[in-house]
Image (cartoon, rainbow, N blue to C red):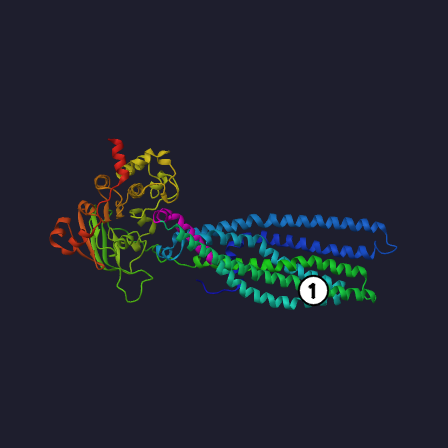
Amino acid sequence: MAAQTTLFESIGRIQPHVRPILGRLTLGLFSALGASVVALAVPQVLRELVNGALHRGGDPAQLWAAAAAVLGLGMLEAGFIALRRQFVINPATTVETGMRVAFYRHLQDLPVAFHDRWGSGQLLSRSMSDLNLIRRWLAFGALMLVVCALTTVIGVALMFASSWQLALVFLAAAIPVVIFGFRFRTSYRVVSRLSQDQAGDLATAVEESVQGIRVLKAFGRGSEALESFSNQAEELRRTEIVKARTLATFALAVTLIPELALGLALVVGVLTVADGQLTVGAVVAFFATAAVVAGPVEALGPLMGMTLTAKTAIDRHFDVMDETSTILDPPPGRELIPETGSGALDFRGVHFRYPDAHAGTRDVLNGVDLHVRPGETMALVGVTGSGKSTLLQLVPRLYDTTAGEVAVDGADVRGLPLEALRTRVAVAFEDTTLFSSSVRDNVLLGAPDQTEEALDEALDVAQAHFAYSLPDGVDTLIGEAGLSLSGGQRQRLALARAIAARPGVLVLDDPLSALDVNTEERVEERLREVLADTTTLIVAHRPSTVQLADRVALLEEGRISAVGTHEELLAGNAHYRYVLASLTDEPEDLDSADEEEALA
């Protein structure tokens, strides 16, 4: 979390986004100020009316002139208000959109390690509700806070012009209001930040429950999830009550104290008129001006609350924007050029530990040395937690090595531009992620320019023929996270996505775990045909996968302890036999079985 900043420091941070619309915001400010000045002019007309037309012997024509002046001023005030909205609303939405796009772009650039730490609900609330708060503050809160403050100053000056005695009584009320204001700013800032953070946590809870609804239902844990959510919602409710009470207390102070001052001023005004020190018109103008000023004074509380909430939103926004990515493109002119285009993959003295690992613990990867030949399919096996999946994620630089290097075609991946590296390396994970789009868009995600023939071939290799039988074929929308499909179907689409990219290096984190042995074998055969020149490194959790590989690498205590064919390691390595015995039994892919029955 960023260090505590002052209100003006926080507001200053959005200045680059606001600069392009600063001219229109200024025009909006002057329009709003113009409306307030016009409103303050009405009491001055009333003073002349009382002292003139309504005075004994006054000219009746002055009454009509005053009525026309008040009508004209009212219409002018309405025009200024319309101009204010015209000047600021559209530009403020432009700022909101620009900041939201920049936020999303930054999220895409940040490393996986960042996303491991942050809840999705916190990021969602920052990208949506916080930026919405900033936009509403820019379009209304900021302008009106300045206008209300200036209106109050101008109004008090006019009140002094009407009666300095009464104005001093009113001005004395400002002292306790200022004291309340300082206390309010401190307490409201804290509770506002807590409220927005709790709202982000609640959003995370909702998303996790929706994503895991099948698990909750299957295990009958819906009531426990509801209880946990209810507790979080109750905490947020209590915080919102404290927030509302804090704002209400300040609003009471800024409303009640000036009203009490006006009551006292009324007594003083009556006495001064009785003594002949003031005219009735001056008293009327004073209290009419006070009535106009009362609105801005009462609005200062909510506007200050809105400003402090916007400050919190800005701080939360920059909590993320201040995060820096450690996985960057190499400096211009220092990019490495691969020695060949064959797809050779090397791990050279690779060490890795997660950023949040406790001091003194052993690295997850503790000196991995491994050479995968061009065009070879190598299986990577090891006991659970040995670091197999972590090793694979170093290839496309989802994480960077702590020490050592990963090389593709002889070039350290850290010296390759990220776009070039991730075009050359394709990945399919065991926990598949699909997007709320069509089958076509999901499969061609890494190769949007590929032809229809490439799409058909990728689906055929992955044995994902079921896609053609969906309601709209490959144009069927598969829903959020692909949860409308079975696990086996999602895995095959994820594999088809990796195949369609036509990579030089294919990294597979057990993407066939939901397939039966026969389907897996057909997939492997087609992979060998279509991607004959592609180097494949696959994490294997099943004996059948191991047997289909050209060679097998055994990961043990963070190192590669043995490399060889399945038969060689089975005959000569006791730990390999132990690992092989612990691999999961072959699952039955019911989807494939249904398809085969339909074809029979």
- Quadrant (top left/top right/bottom left/bottom right) for the N terminus: bottom left
Residue 522: percent from the left, percent from the top? 22, 39
Q: Is residue 237 above or below residue 271?
A: above
Which residue is drawn at the image coordinates 21% and 51% (left, top)? Answer: 380
Q: Quadrant of residue 456?
A: top left
Q: Is residue 300 visible?
A: yes
Residue 482: percent from the left, percent from the top? 36, 43
Describe residue 204's horizontal placement relative to residue 136 as left or right: left
Describe residue 86's horizontal placement relative to residue 520 as left or right: right
Q: Secondary structure at mark 1?
A: helix
Main SS, magenta region, reads helix
Q: Which residue is mark 1?
A: 260
Describe residue 518's horizontal placement relative to residue 282 as left or right: left
Q: Furthest residue to the right? A: 57
Q: Furthest residue to the top? A: 600
* Residue 585 shown in magenta: no
Describe residue 176's horizontal placement relative to residue 393 as left or right: right
Q: Amino acid at mark 1?
A: Leu
Q: Quadrant of residue 471?
A: top left
Residue 233: percent from the left, percent from the top? 47, 55
Query: How many residues crowd around disc 1 within 10 Å: few (fewer than 14), some, or many (20 or more)?
Result: some
Q: Is residue 332 visible?
A: no
Q: Quadrant of residue 186?
A: bottom right
* Residue 217 shown in magenta: yes
Which residue is drawn at the image coordinates 59% and 65% (left, top)? Answer: 181
- Quadrant (top left/top right/bottom left/bottom right) for the C terminus: top left
Tell me how many marks there are.
Answer: 1
Residue 318: percent from the left, percent from the top? 46, 58
Which segment did they paint magenta?
Answer: 197-219
